[in-house]
Image: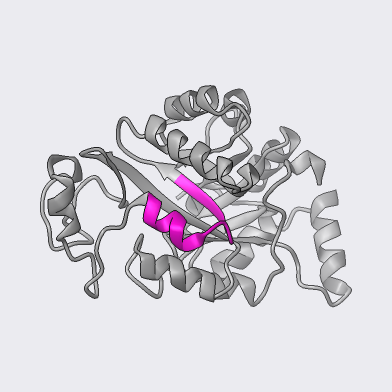
Amino acid sequence: MCNTNNIFSSSKYLTKRYTKSMKNEKPELLCIAHRGAMGHAPENTLTSVKKAMELGADCIEIDAYYVDGHLVIFHDERLDRTSNGTGYLSDHSFSSLRELDVGNGEHIPTLEEVCELIDSRVCLNIELKGENTVQPVATLVLKLIESGWDKESFLISSFRHRELLEMKKLIPDIKIGALLHGILVDDAKFAEDLGAFSVHPSLECIDKRFVDDAHARCLRVYAYGADHIDDIKKMYRLGVDGVFTGFPERVIKNFSQGDFTTRWCER
């Protein structure tokens, strides 16, 4: 566990947020449905994505691998935890992956199917997983933008920061989000160096200093793993801009939705 002291420290931003709350308006915190509404349906499935939209999530996060010539939506490198399959995802053919049950009779969807379901109605955070994912994701995103999707509705994230740089080369004006677990010595500088729009720390390893440093660098802060209402409220008190949650209704009930399109310093 990381040190999370001083979570009640004040700042101009927090003062503004609490003032808004005192005016009987909901305080602001963006809800990003984590792998869809994974608290209600099998994660990274079409049902989970549909449920997140039904609950009112304005942004949905899913995980994409490139396997056997297809972009498939799955979180782990191995199949064992969330499906009736075994072994590494990348060792299977696309047809065999499609036959697997990932919970309640659901099957592994493709990124194209997820986008068809969303139909540009909500923002989409695509996390790059595995190898060789950048080019096919970029190709699909560009195709969707050409068909009428707003490029501002996309956020491409990854723990694999070199792939984020590669994505920026292919689509220079796409928003990227840098994932991390733990707090680095120079806080959010690495994300600024990447040209990121946002930085995505684990809620277990985030403190007020990190949030303030990220904001000073014009970065949005979206914390992942915030499923319990106490954690969601704690992230709000720290000053984060949004949370990844498997229970979108817990955020939407208590908070208004923040701005997904502008950098923090442009708010």
- Residue 203 at x, y percent in the picture: 52, 54
Q: Residue at x 69, y 64 (%)?
A: 257
Determine if residue 139 is in view. yes
- Residue 208 at x, y percent in the picture: 67, 47
Q: How is the image coloured?
A: one colour
Q: Residue at x 59, y 35 (%)?
A: 174
Q: Quadrant of residue 41?
A: bottom left
Residue 215 covered by magenta stretch: no
Q: Residue at x 17, y 53 (%)?
A: 97
Determine if residue 38 is in view. no
Against 221, residue 166 (above or below) is above
Q: How many marks?
A: 0
Against 142, residue 82 (above or below) is below
Residue at the front extreme?
147
Locate residue 50 relative to residue 68 in the image: left or right. right
- Residue 180 at x, y percent in the picture: 47, 39
Residue 114 covered by magenta stretch: yes
Q: Residue at x 56, y 47 (%)?
A: 206
- Residue 16 at x, y percent in the picture: 85, 58
Against 11, residue 19 (above or below) is below
Residue closer to the observer: 57 or 25:
57
Residue closer to the observer: 136 or 14:
136
Q: Quadrant of residue 172?
A: top right
The residues colored magenta run 112-126
Locate residue 87 relative to residue 147 in the image: left or right. left
